[in-house]
Image (cartoon, grey):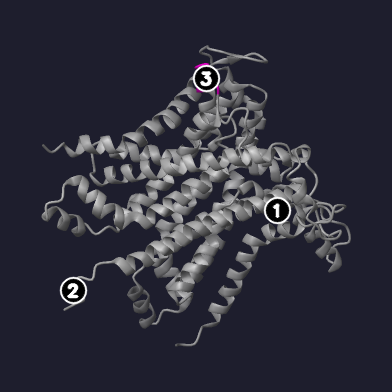
């Protein structure tokens, strides 16, 4: 192997500092959430304790964070499933280059770049004028989809740009119907990418703030609850909450990555042995 | 009987169309309509008047806030681009094993899937009056009084933007760099180009589409933001998003809607210009 140039070491240090910049603050509040009962929002640590984590389980100290967590979790699953199904269907549709697809594509881009608060305001106004109650599972759900669907769609574009059409042609040549081709050929091939779409759908919903702000009604989702806490909670309990939900996010991300890895292994193991026996 | 691909295409795209129609297009129309309405202290009423717009364009404060919004976008863009390009360049051209590349790339993207609000909160112990940064500066003898402008200032707002959004630059730039044909770089080196010349004349031009996509993300996220500015400036600084959210808090929906319309037109114009330089669908 050739010798590394000096620039490699300089850039490696830069990269290391960048990672520190990304994770340092999160690690810091992770440490500070174990602050002793008398400790404050910054160093020094006044002893080490689980005091602030215990506080999270006391209604008076933090409000209804567990209810908020449940709602965010359910909403995340709803958004995740919808995002996967709708993105795959739209991805298949866009391959056909149907008339008017450019308009729909620009709508999706607009959905991605529009300031989130506009969605919040617009949806809130519509529900208001129609005399409907905003609720996280209706207006909040729809508003979040305007954020997750464009990501899902862009991933589907990336997937289908790399998709080898000869697999489909082979299936059709052997008499598969259109639906059979999708069900037994296309979907299994793109399955690992769909796990990626699901990850985007769940996490973007779980962390969404601005689009849910005016559309979730009287029951807060977790990010709204956390934001509410920043204005009136001045103890490390907010760090404990931050640490717990970050750990939860890491767990979710880990689970998705693990399933991608397992799917890859399974494919390698069960994949066709055509040609290997020759 | 085979359906026309136009019909079956629209059928498959129907769910997407319905969602975007109901929760993107309808809200935009609603905002445009309400921007002409009037408001009392506690309610809004249908009307067709230009009061909201004439107030908006007549107010010096509003112009200043729009200017501040562009300032945030521009400074954040410059930092995220410089950092994002460097990180992507290191990953794409200096890390040799593919497994290592994937691992480091994931390391850079994981924070994207965690909560922005918590990532903002996590700056407090660093930047506060008695925070880590100030303690370090004092113990090193750089300053003898705590620096006041670390938290609740333009500095902390931009720091948070860079922290939150640099990965929107890293990902598309890395993606474009990985697709550069390595023989082009070899050719440049064989012809005697220095590493810097290769970077400047081969890699940089070929990376432009990725830079454009990253730019679109960062610029729109910063221009449409209201929560980062509010939180990181301790409500002492303003951008357009905060104007809107303040009006909403005061139930002045028509005024919020008019500001929203102007903001949306501004953002779409910026994006329209950027999209002239890149074909997003081809670059994915």
Horizontal side of residue B72 vs A164, given as left or right: right
Q: Quadrant of the C terminus of chain B?
A: bottom left
Horizontal side of residue B282 vs A216, given as left or right: left
Nearer to us of marks 3 and 1 is 3
- Residue for badge 2: A275
One can see residue B224 in this view: yes
Q: Secondary structure at mark 2?
A: loop
- Residue for badge 3: A132
Could you tell me how far apart the alpha carbons at marks 3 and 2 are, in whole angstroms?
62 Å
Q: Position of residue B134 (x, y in %)?
A: 81, 59
Q: Position of residue A96 (x, y in %)?
A: 23, 44
The first of marks 3 and 2 along the sequence is 3
Position of A247 relative to A18 (above/below):
above
- Residue for badge 1: B122
Q: Secondary structure at mark 1?
A: loop
**Is disc 1 on the same chain as disc 3?**
no
Residue beneath the point at 15% across and 51% down: A176
Magenta segment: A126-133
Nearer to us of marks 3 and 2 is 2
Nearer to us of marks 2 and 1 is 2
Position of B28 relative to A62 (above/below):
above
**Is disc 1 on the same chain as disc 2?**
no
B276 or A70, nearer to the observer? A70
Chain holding disc 2 = A
Q: What is the quadrant of residue A120 in the picture?
A: top right
């Amino acid at each position: 192997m050739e010798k590394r140039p000096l620039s490699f070491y300089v850039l490696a240090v830069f990269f290391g500092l960048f990672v520190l910049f990304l994770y340092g603050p999160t690690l810091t509040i992770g440490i500070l959430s174990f602050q002793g009962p008398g400790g404050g929002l910054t160093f020094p640590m006044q002893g080490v304790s689980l005091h602030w984590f215990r506080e999270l389980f006391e209604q008076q100290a933090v409000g209804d964070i567990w209810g908020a967590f449940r709602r965010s979790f359910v909403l995340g699953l709803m958004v995740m499933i919808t995002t996967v199904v709708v993105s795959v269907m739209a991805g298949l549709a866009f391959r056909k280059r149907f008339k008017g697809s450019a308009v729909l594509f620009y709508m999706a881009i607009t959905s991605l770049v529009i300031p989130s608060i506009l969605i919040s305001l617009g949806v809130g106004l519509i529900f208001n004028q129609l005399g409907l109650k905003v609720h996280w599972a209706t207006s909040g759900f729809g508003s979040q989809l305007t954020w997750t669907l464009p990501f899902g769609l862009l991933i589907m574009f990336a997937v289908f740009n790399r998709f080898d059409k000869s697999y489909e042609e082979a299936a059709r040549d052997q008499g598969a119907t259109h639906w059979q081709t999708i069900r037994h050929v296309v979907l299994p091939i793109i399955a690992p990418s769909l796990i990626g779409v699901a990850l985007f759908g769940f996490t973007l919903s779980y962390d969404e703030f601005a689009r849910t702000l005016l559309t979730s009604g009287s029951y807060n989702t977790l990010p709204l609850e956390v934001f509410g806490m920043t204005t009136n909670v001045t103890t490390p309990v907010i760090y404990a909450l931050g640490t717990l939900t970050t750990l939860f996010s890491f767990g979710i991300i880990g689970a998705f990555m693990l399933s991608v890895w397992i799917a890859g292994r399974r494919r390698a193991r069960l994949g066709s042995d055509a040609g290997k026996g020759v | 009987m085979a359906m026309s691909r136009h019909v079956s295409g629209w059928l498959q795209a129907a769910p997407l169309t319905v969602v975007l129609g109901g929760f993107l297009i309808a809200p935009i129309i609603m905002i445009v309509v309400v921007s002409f309405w009037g408001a009392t202290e506690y309610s809004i009423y249908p009307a067709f008047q230009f009061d909201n717009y004439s107030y908006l364009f007549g107010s010096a404060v509003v112009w200043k806030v729009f200017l501040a919004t562009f300032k945030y976008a521009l400074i954040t863009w410059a930092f995220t681009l410089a950092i994002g390009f460097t990180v992507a360049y290191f990953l794409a051209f200096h890390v040799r094993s593919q497994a290592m590349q994937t691992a480091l790339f994931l390391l850079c993207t994981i924070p994207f899937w965690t909560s922005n609000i918590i990532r903002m909160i996590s700056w407090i112990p660093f930047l506060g009056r008695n925070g880590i940064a100030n303690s370090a500066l004092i113990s090193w003898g750089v300053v003898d009084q705590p620096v006041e402008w670390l938290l609740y200032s333009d500095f902390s707002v931009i720091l948070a933007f860079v922290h939150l959004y640099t990965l929107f630059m890293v990902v598309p730039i890395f993606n474009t760099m990985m697709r550069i044909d390595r023989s082009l770089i070899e050719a440049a080196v064989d012809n005697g180009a220095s590493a810097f010349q290769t970077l400047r004349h081969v890699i940089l031009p070929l990376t432009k589409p990725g830079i454009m996509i990253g730019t679109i993300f960062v610029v729109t996220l910063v221009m449409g933001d209201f929560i980062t500015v509010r939180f990181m400036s301790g409500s002492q600084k303003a951008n357009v998003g905060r104007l809107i959210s303040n009006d909403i808090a005061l139930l002045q929906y028509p005024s919020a809607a008019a500001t929203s319309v102007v903001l949306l037109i501004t953002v779409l114009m910026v994006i329209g210009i950027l999209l002239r330089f890149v074909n997003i669908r081809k670059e994915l």
